[in-house]
Image (tube, helix red, strand yellow):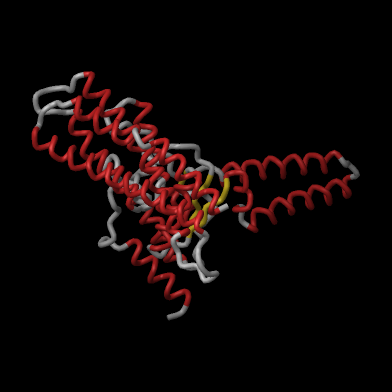
């Protein structure tokens, strides 16, 4: 299979009706970019711009345009989709971590993408456009020499500069700017923290625990007997806030210990290092137990269908009580990896 044929096959797979967009872990809407959360829920500063690399085949570009128009549910114009498929306009602006995951997910589905820092958007200007700017300057210089009026050089330089600024602005303008939405029903501060944590965590155990914690906690805010009392709302807020921070701790411990626990060909491990790894492993195991206990209790509360703010507070306290130990464990493994 030639490179062009493989690219066509990959694009066909990407745009096939059988390849549906997964759902956002938070709000349930389409997750066209494969982040695990929709872009609206991946709130944060958009430091990176996600571009699709231009294909040399018109059929590929047309297929990508159609996929964008379908997957993004009419929120992208046809002209914008055309520019995105041509590789001269970003699909979306995302926090750097989410952008890296988006490019990885799209690449896994056969679409070549790249995340570019916003400050380097000028590197995406097409070669032809750069040549056009040079032609404007050259033509202005030639006309100035022929007419004996060097003011024309300044006018040509100004025109080229204005064209360059417009081109860079276009290269920095995402085709898709999703409207922010509030879906969780908790306080705005906690919702921001939960969404930012879910958007920042890679798919793994920690992210799964936090997702399940959100899924099982939110129905308590809408009991069948009516609206929740302020004590229940406050307890759910606190539980999700601490759960977000605990998930970050667990993710960091999982990744760090995954490196430290690899077999070392250098020989026996230093006793102090082994002890530090052991303490961190115990802390991780304790945190996993806390999450599993919390999820089991929340699942039971769903069946009970009663407001139990005291038990919610207790669940939050269990996640909070080991925070100092988790901080020490993270710092120990950080020093070992330094």
Q: Relative to 223, does residue 60 appear above or below in the rendering?
A: below
Q: The N terminus appears in which quarter of the rendering? A: bottom left
Q: Residue furthest front?
A: 271
Please tell me which residue lies in front, 4 or 327. Answer: 327
Residue 30 in the image: state x and y as whole percent.
30, 47
The one nearer the camera, 326 or 214, is 326
In the figure, is residue 26 to the left or right of 81? left
Query: Can residue 93 be spotted in the picture?
Result: no
Relative vertical location of residue 142 with respect to residue 223 in this rendering, above or below: below
Left or right: 301, with 95 as reference point: left
Residue 49 location (% of width, % of height) = 52, 47
Taking the view exactly as shown, the residue that stands out farthest to the right is 148
Q: Is residue 180 left or right of residue 211?
A: right
| Residue sitting at x 88%, y 45% | 147
Which residue is located at x 35 percent, y 51 percent? 32
Q: Quadrant of residue 257?
A: bottom left
- Quarter holding residue 111: bottom left
Q: Residue 104's x, y, as percent? A: 44, 58
Q: Position of residue 44 (x, y in %)?
A: 46, 37
Q: Is residue 310 above or below residue 328?
A: above
Is residue 126 something one can see in this rendering?
A: yes
Residue at 47% x, 62% y is 112
Q: Nearer the viewer, residue 332 or 193?
A: 332
The residue most toward the bottom is 1
Marks counted in the figure total: 0
Q: Residue at x 25, y 33 (%)?
A: 315
- Most distant residue in the top direction: 230
């Amino acid at each position: 299979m030639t490179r062009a044929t493989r690219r066509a096959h990959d694009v066909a797979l990407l745009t096939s009706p059988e390849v549906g967009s997964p759902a956002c872990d938070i709000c349930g809407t389409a997750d066209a970019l494969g982040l695990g959360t929709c872009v609206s829920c991946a709130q944060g500063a958009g430091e990176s711009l996600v571009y699709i690399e231009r294909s040399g085949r018109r059929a590929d570009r047309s297929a990508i345009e159609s996929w964008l128009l379908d997957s993004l549910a009419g929120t992208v114009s046809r002209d914008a989709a055309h520019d995105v498929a041509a590789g001269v306009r970003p699909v979306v602006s995302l926090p750097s971590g989410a952008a890296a995951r988006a490019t990885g997910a799209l690449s896994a589905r056969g679409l070549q993408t790249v995340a570019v820092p916003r400050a380097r958007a000028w590197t995406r200007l097409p070669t032809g456009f750069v040549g056009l700017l040079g032609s404007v300057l050259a033509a202005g210089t030639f006309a100035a020499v022929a007419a004996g009026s060097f003011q024309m050089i300044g006018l040509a330089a100004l025109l080229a500069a204005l064209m360059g600024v417009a081109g860079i602005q276009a290269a920095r303008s995402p085709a898709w700017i999703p409207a922010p939405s509030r879906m969780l029903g908790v306080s705005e501060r906690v919702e921001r923290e939960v969404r930012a944590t879910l958007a920042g965590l890679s798919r793994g155990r920690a992210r799964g625990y936090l997702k399940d914690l959100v899924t099982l906690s939110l129905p308590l805010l809408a009991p069948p007997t009516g609206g929740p009392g302020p004590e229940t709302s406050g307890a759910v807020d606190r539980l999700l806030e601490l759960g977000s921070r605990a998930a970050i701790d667990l993710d960091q411990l999982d990744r760090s210990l995954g490196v430290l626990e690899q077999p070392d060909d250098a020989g026996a491990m230093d006793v102090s290092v082994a002890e530090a790894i052991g303490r961190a492993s115990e802390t991780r195991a304790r945190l996993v137990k806390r999450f599993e206990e919390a999820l089991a209790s929340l699942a039971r509360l769903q069946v009970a269908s009663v407001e139990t703010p005291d038990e919610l507070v207790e669940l939050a306290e269990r996640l909070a009580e080991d925070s100092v130990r988790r901080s020490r464990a993270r710092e120990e493994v950080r020093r070992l990896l330094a």
